[in-house]
Image (tube, rainbow, N blue to C red):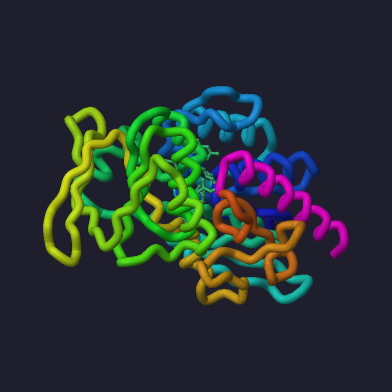
Amino acid sequence: TFDTLMIGGGPAGAAAAVYAARKGILTGVAAERFGGQVLDTMAIENLISVPHTEGPKLAAALEEHVKEYEVDIMNLQRAVKLLPGRPGEVHEVQFESGASLRAKTLVLATGARWREMGVPGEAEYRNKGVAYCPHCDGPLFKGKHVAVIGGGNSGVEAAIDLAGIVGHVTLIEFMDEMRADAVLQKKLRSLPNVDIVLGARTTEVNGDGKRVTGLTYEERASGEVKKIDLQGVFVQIGLVPNTEWLKESPIELSERGEIVVDARGMTSVPGIFAAGDVTTVPYKQIVIAMGEGSKAALGAFDHLIRS
Ligand code: FAD
């Protein structure tokens, strides 16, 4: 039985493991893919004090740091069920492999994934013009023409943010109106280098084999197909938390399926903590996930010494 077990080995789970292990308690990390979303990232330039790194390099550094301590790392383990213990009892997590692990406290750090459009060219040009994170990749498109797909709050916020960096932004929304808050829409419409295309279905990301060169969409009302020349496409149609495996558990989830946590990172079930992109904490970023993971581990330690 672990004192504390992290489910997920991205920045949040790794940070939690380092903090927990440094308290001298029995610590484990079980992850489907140690490294998490960072493995899918190329340039990272906003991890404070590290001006430039690359995803795979950061993932290796996370693992190296965790391995400085006596932490049991169980990679390629996908959690499928959580069986919380009654107060004072241990919690159990079951894995797809058939294995199950028990721990006095848990830190759930299973992260999230960007919803994809699923159109030709999107996967092919990922990190070659197709991007999902304006805070991360916006500066790479300085002075260029980019599209933002999606007129919800995240799409409109991204378009406003990018308009200050890139040359021109075209926002493309599937419905005939944007769903974003009125104040955001008003701000967006006031910007000189933004145009908005409503009622449009994106059908393809075009490229020259190396990089994105344009976007094809269909005007839904007329069925007319149009092409725009541009260098970047930011897909902002939703971030999906990896909480499917918790749906039948008593852990409280928000409307969007994110784990609700308190100021110490504790979920609605005492002794079970959560951190990073999987939670309701806003602004999904590496540095934030690391901070939240550290906090959740300290929360778990505090819980252990009190019970
Ligand atoms: P994740 O990194 O998502 O890690 C989740 C972990 O949980 C993984 O180990 C995963 O395998 C595991 N897991 C999931 N489900 C299960 C399960 N059922 N059972 C067991 N394990 C499970 N942020 C920045 O700050 N700067 C950037 O430049 C940047 N660029 C990005 C570029 C891309 C392409 C992407 C996709 C994201 C980028 N981000 C960037 C965001 C950043 O990667 C995330 O905010 C961060 O990784 C979140 O960390 P996390 O530990 O909460 O979750």
Q: Is residue 162 magenta?
A: no
User: Percent position (x, y) of residue 300?
Assistant: 76, 56
Q: Residue 150, relative to residue 287: is it above or below?
A: below
Q: Answer yes or no: is residue 269 visible.
A: yes
Query: Residue at coordinates 61% horizontally, 42% vertically from top-left?
Result: 14
User: Percent position (x, y) of residue 143?
Assistant: 39, 28
User: Percent position (x, y) of residue 258?
Assistant: 55, 64
Residue at the farthest right position = 306
Seen in the image, is 236 located left or right of residue 303?
left
Near-viewer residue (23 or 48): 48
Query: Residue at coordinates 57% horizontally, 34% vertically from top-left?
Result: 63
Q: Is residue 294 magenta?
A: yes
Near-viewer residue (167 or 205): 167
Magenta region, main secondary structure: helix
* Count of numbered tags: 0
Query: Residue at coordinates 53% horizontally, 28% vertically from top-left?
Result: 45
Q: Quadrant of the C terminus?
A: bottom right
Query: Residue at coordinates 47% horizontally, 33% vertically from top-left?
Result: 165
Near-viewer residue (43 or 243): 43
Residue at the farthest top position = 51
What is the quadrant of residue 211 in the picture?
top left
Q: Residue 269, relative to residue 12: is it above or below?
A: below
User: Percent position (x, y) of residue 203?
Assistant: 19, 53
Q: Quadrant of the N terminus?
A: bottom right
- What residue span does the magenta drawing correspond to? 284-307
Seen in the image, is 62 located left or right of residue 241?
right
Q: Answer yes or no: is residue 33 visible.
A: no
Near-viewer residue (193 or 77): 193
Seen in the image, is 87 located left or right of residue 229?
right
